[in-house]
Amino acid sequence: MNYQKRFRVQPGSRVRLSRMDTAFTGGHKHHKQAADEIDYYRRRLWDLQELLYADHRRSLLICLQGMDAGGKDGTINHVLGAMNPQGCRVVGFKQPSAEELSHDFLWRVHRAAPRRGEVVIFNRSHYEDVLIARVHNLVPQKVWSRRYEAINAFENELVDADVHIIKFFLHISKAEQLKRFRQRLDDPAKQWKISEADYKERPFWNDYTAAYEDALSRCSTAGAPWYVIPSDHKWFRNLAVARIVVEHLESLKMKFPKPTVDIDHIRREYHAAARS
């Protein structure tokens, strides 16, 4: 199965999240069946990210979005944590500061874009400005409705600067979200994640779904595609995300740059030092 093709939102298509199976596992019956495959793609991520860093001609931006408890932190920890932190950075977008609010909505996002050779993961992203801002009427409709075009233009600008963009919507069911909230209540190691806002947002599930469907439909482009990842099973989510990132990086056909020093000369100096 081609995971890129299977989960990509085709440009111009209309997304209906209710028709997408959140529990899909691609033929794997359980975690153990997929464990070796997950490990393989995690190792490949390490190698390919090293190539990206050494090549230093392009960069990678990964955007993670999803309902509360959708698995953004887990994806970063279990999949993208396989990368070398020297060339990888995670940026979380929460409520904007007073300074950020005094600029256009993309100002803080552009500042966080990856440098050449770098991988940056957005834990939530500029899409919050057509999601929560829309659902809770933080700005008028005439404002947020224009932001889709601004987002596409912004992402196209990054693509023109050799930033490769992959966007993942981690798709869970409403029942799975409630199950994960319950696990947080019962697990002392996860209780710190609990917020009253989690439960207060539950009644807005359908509103968020409609907002996500519009964002996915209107902002999946050839250069910055959206992928809808079935995420009820955390292990399959990890496999799908890792595999898609690996497939994309492999398609770049990267090579290590040629050395900037005379290797034969350095080798002769090394052998001379070893004999002395």
Image (spheres, helix red, strand yellow):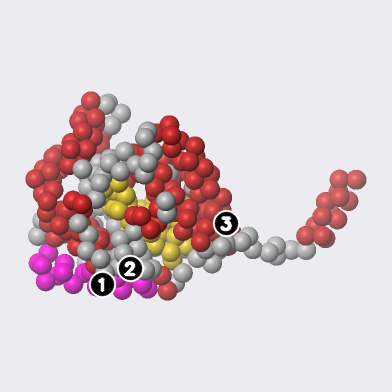
Between discs 3 and 2, the one toward the N terminus: 3
SS at mark 1 in the image = helix
124 and 232: which one is in front?
232
235 horizontally vs 205: left or right: right
193 horizontally vs 239: left or right: left
Q: How far apart are marks 3 and 2 (CA)?
A: 26 Å
Q: Distance between the residues labelled 3 and 1?
A: 32 Å
Which residue corresponds to the image point at 26% horizontal and 45% vertical from the top-left?
A: 22
Whether residue 150 is in magenta: the answer is yes
Q: Is residue 154 above or below residue 226?
A: below
Q: How far apart are marks 1 and 2 (CA)?
A: 13 Å
Between discs 3 and 1, the one toward the N terminus: 3
Q: Which amino acid type is marked by label 1?
A: Ala
Residue picked out by circle 2: 221
Residue span colored magenta: 138-157
Picture coordinates of residue 186, whole percent (x, y)? 23, 25
Front tag of 3 and 2: 2
Residue picked out by circle 3: 51
Q: Is residue 161 above or below residue 172?
A: below
User: Could you tell me if the residues under marks 1 and 2 are in contact, i.e. CB atoms within 8 Å?
Assistant: no
Q: Which amino acid type is marked by label 2?
A: Thr
SS at mark 2 in the image = loop
- Residue 150 badge: 1
**Circle count:** 3
Picture coordinates of residue 33, whole percent (x, y)? 43, 34
